[in-house]
Image (cartoon, coloured by chain):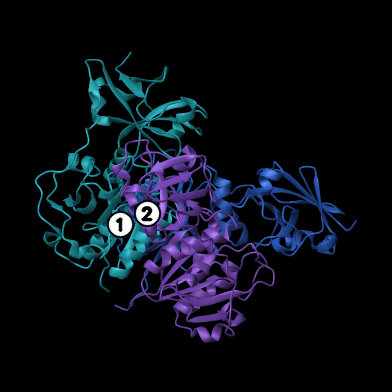
Chain colours: A purple, B blue, C cyan
Amino acid sequence: MLTRPLITLTTDFGAGSPYVAQMKGVILSLCREVDLIDITHAVGPQNIREGAIVLADTTPRFPPGTIHVAVVDPGVGTARRLIYTEIGQQRYVAPDNGLASFLINQALPQRLIALENRAYWLPETSHTFHGRDILAPVAAHLALGVDPALLGPPLETCVMLDAVLPQKSVSNVTGEVLYVDSFGNLITNIARNDVVFLGDMARLSVQCQGRTIHGLIPTYAAAMPGEVVALFDSQGRLEIAVAGGHAARELAATVGAVVCVSGNL
Amino acid sequence: MLTRPLITLTTDFGAGSPYVAQMKGVILSLCREVDLIDITHAVGPQNIREGAIVLADTTPRFPPGTIHVAVVDPGVGTARRLIYTEIGQQRYVAPDNGLASFLINQALPQRLIALENRAYWLPETSHTFHGRDILAPVAAHLALGVDPALLGPPLETCVMLDAVLPQKSVSNVTGEVLYVDSFGNLITNIARNDVVFLGDMARLSVQCQGRTIHGLIPTYAAAMPGEVVALFDSQGRLEIAVAGGHAARELAATVGAVVCVSGNL
Amino acid sequence: MLTRPLITLTTDFGAGSPYVAQMKGVILSLCREVDLIDITHAVGPQNIREGAIVLADTTPRFPPGTIHVAVVDPGVGTARRLIYTEIGQQRYVAPDNGLASFLINQALPQRLIALENRAYWLPETSHTFHGRDILAPVAAHLALGVDPALLGPPLETCVMLDAVLPQKSVSNVTGEVLYVDSFGNLITNIARNDVVFLGDMARLSVQCQGRTIHGLIPTYAAAMPGEVVALFDSQGRLEIAVAGGHAARELAATVGAVVCVSGNL
């Protein structure tokens, strides 16, 4: 049995949007032998930064050669470019608006191409839905084995988002909430490595929204029900959670809220 | 490699409803070699008109021969029929309640059959879930290659929804909001062709909910952030949007709101 | 063509959670030739009972040998076990927290194994996401044909939830609302067989939240619009519905609300 190519979809269209199905119809009409996987369609509308985090956290888990189509595209219909890029062992087609930034922070692209060859687009393209009219057919042609060099001219650079890095001092590390997950957990931009120099995890303190959490715990279940806790999540990021509850509501915190980790007291 | 048949699902069960998974289990138990694609499960409960719009906008994008199962079925358990129909190059199984109307407005059915042959249903059928007990197994049998003529007797007609057509006068076109998409954009029943006779797009004015928009723009990105704009969407329908915002909330508009396009001022 | 193994996913991660996609990436990286089906990701956060109902209602519909991965796991990172079990013709991997209870009430497990062999886990496992780090790779190895006996030692027992059984007297049956479906229908723990001894269905009365419903009907469509009705749903459970409406809102009822069925008046 020949293995089918794999295409994933990441958009801000909303769960259950028929726009996603239109993209799938276009892909399947060009390349019937393909497996389609939804990463998420719940990226906040036009929230490029959130889309970039999702792509960086999720797509490296996929088999080598997977084609990832990302559509968070507030600039659709303007002169912004669309790009093909290869990062690690994955392949991406997306608007050139920073969606690949956090992947590129992890590993330089092996290849970067502007999608300019209309031979691989739909014959008619709208002004408002390049995900369906350009990115979907390009992904289908890649799945059919088209050489990426045919898609357009190589590029030297692409748009990069500012990384939001935590600030370190002698005795603490200050970062912020990157996103809120579906359990209400506050996921920060502070990695385990960022706070190692502060000493024993169990003796650190974490401050957020006027609350102080004493000591990091290894897992949710080490907490009392309702307790506000801090721990490293499955991506290695500092996370603030309420055991059996919803930290974002409990702390009235959202994206951008400041989080400070201090050394042994 | 033999190509697998393709079955899509469109329902009003809500995203994440296990009822959808029950249908998939029934299909896969009868026909293991099939690819399943979700169109949407977010059609408003019992909203046949919205389901009909989704089917008309989305399903013609799929490969020829795709089997589309549609379940928006407020009449389940009554004498309403279930039908198989072929429209364009697509195949449909659905309640006979108008779900296929807007597809039939585009092209006459090549075939129309009442699903009456119980040999292709589940052995036991409930009174409340014909999507699982009748439509899913019929779709699976079609995927297995069953001749549609075996499903039941041919029909001459099926239920049609009233089309909501825009009204034209010498100097304007009056239509209404058909649905609100996941970005809050107001999608109307006014097509590009309906307003061509009014002259230069950039000089038309659009009125909705007491607001007047001067001139249609080609794409969202031609607007200032927060600006209320009108443009033709990727289906060729007039759409009212707020750049980077949510038009339905901003204009307090919903399905049925009147939209009037006037000629050059 | 060889038939691909089939893996389903049931979680409380929320529709569109990228955590689901991480699990799919892990599975596909280990076993590319597999079909993935979502049962639901809308189980209430940490609601093991709801997850157990969904698994019992849905998974027996799937083809024999299907591998069902269930992740509703408030005890992640504690000493709670993870298990493999075979029930009916289906296979399951899940935390040992009662998720399989209602399946086991229907049929005893043919096999029950503790997932302890780290050879089938990801090389690095987090403390907070065993769905991705243990259950997903174990499911992939099962799909590849690994003998379940290699996954760990056999178990004699697993955690069982209390069944919430209806109480019977001479003249009535008292139960409760098990869950509210996406249409707002109140699904109870009272089965058709539980009330047969009370006589003619059309002459039973049903009480809930101070409302009395006279006579069960065969299907929604036998009701007047807006009428509160009782009927047996497609699983054979007593259900309270509002024709064209939302019973949970109309009756201000939720999970646990008492429902009483009385005999012929």
Q: Which residue is mark 2?
A: A233
Horizontal side, residue C107 vs residue B187: left or right? left
Give the residue type at disc 1. Ser
Image position, residue C90 (x, y; %): 21, 53
Horizontal side, residue A54 vs residue C234: left or right? right
Q: What chain does badge 2 belong to?
A: A
Q: C114 or B129, which is in the foreground?
A: C114
Pointer 2 local density, CA inside 10 Å: few below 14, some 14–19, many at least 20? many
Q: A207 or A2, which is in the foreground?
A: A207
Query: Which of the numbered marks, if any, corresponds to residue B8?
Result: none
Q: Quadrant of residue A107?
A: bottom left
- Residue at screen point 57% across, 48% down: B50
The residue at the far top in this view is C265
- Residue at screen point 87% across, 54% down: B171
Give the residue type at disc 2. Asp
The vertical placement of B244 against A161, above or below, is above
Q: Which residue is mark 1?
A: C126
Q: B265 or C101, which is in the foreground?
A: C101
Horizontal side, residue A107 vs residue C106: left or right? right
- Residue at screen point 66% across, 52% down: B185
The vertical placement of C159 against A106, above or below, is above
Pointers 2 and 1 within a single chain: no
The residue at the far right in this view is B265
Circle 1 — which element? loop
**Residue B121 can be seen in this image:** no
Pointers 2 and 1 in contact (CB under 8 A)?
Answer: yes
